[in-house]
Amino acid sequence: MMTNFDALAAIRRFFSVVECAGLILPSGWFGRPYDNLMQLTRGEASEDSLLLELDGQLILKFAGRTQVASTDRGLQIGGFAVLSWDWTEFGSASSHREEFDSGAVELVGPMG
């Protein structure tokens, strides 16, 4: 059984190889597919949560135990109880928050 610490280690390994990735939320792509690429700027894990910060201002907080699986495009993160998605628009102070209680997040490596 994968722990959130294992999940974070897998995500860090992924970013050490690809450096930046696109983001697909349970509601769809964040930004333009294969064009908006983000770096992992912080990662924290505990027994019951996983936090990922992308580009210093995009926060994914997974409650519950997550599962990470490799896909042909990158990594898929699922199994969470609730995902809180907080983000601030680039070059703006406008902040947004969404919550998802199902689905998966996919980190997609750059094309080419």
Image (cartoon, rainbow, N blue to C red):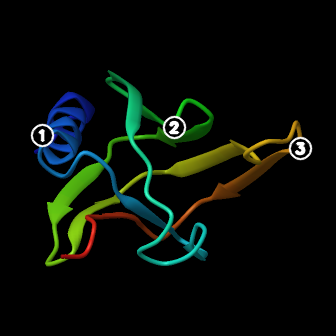
Element assignment for label 3: loop
Label 1 crowding class (10 Å Cα cut-off): few <14, some 14-19, many 20+?
few
Gap between marks 1 and 2, in whole Å?
17 Å
Element assignment for label 1: helix
Q: Quadrant of residue 78?
A: bottom left
**Which quadrant does the N terminus fall into?**
top left
Q: Amino acid at mark 3?
A: Ser
Above or below, 86 relative to 18: above
Task: Say whether residue 102 is left or right of residue 39.
Answer: right
Q: Amino acid at mark 2?
A: Asp
Q: Quadrant of residue 37?
A: bottom left
**Which quadrant does the C terminus fall into?**
bottom left
> Where does the image place residue 46, in percent across and percent down from the top left?
35, 21
> Where does the image place residue 10, in percent across and percent down from the top left?
14, 42
Gap between marks 1 and 3, in whole Å?
32 Å
Task: Say whether residue 82 is left or right of residue 4.
Answer: right
Residue occupying image coordinates x 69% and y 43%: 86
Look at mark 1 in the image and give the residue it sits on.
13
Give the mark, 2 or 3, whose residue is nearer the N terminus.
Answer: 2
Residue occupying image coordinates x 51% and y 37%: 55
Look at mark 3 in the image and give the residue it sits on.
94
> Where does the image place residue 31, in percent across and percent down from the top left?
60, 69
Q: Are marks 2 and 3 in contact (CB under 8 Å)?
A: no
Q: Amino acid at mark 1?
A: Arg
Look at mark 2 in the image and give the residue it sits on.
55
Q: Are marks 1 and 3 in contact (CB under 8 Å)?
A: no
Question: What number is the disc on residue 40?
Answer: none
Residue occupying image coordinates x 15% and y 39%: 16
Residue occupying image coordinates x 39% and y 42%: 39
Give the mark, 1 or 2, whose residue is nearer the N terminus.
Answer: 1
Give the mark, 1 or 3, whose residue is nearer the N terminus.
Answer: 1
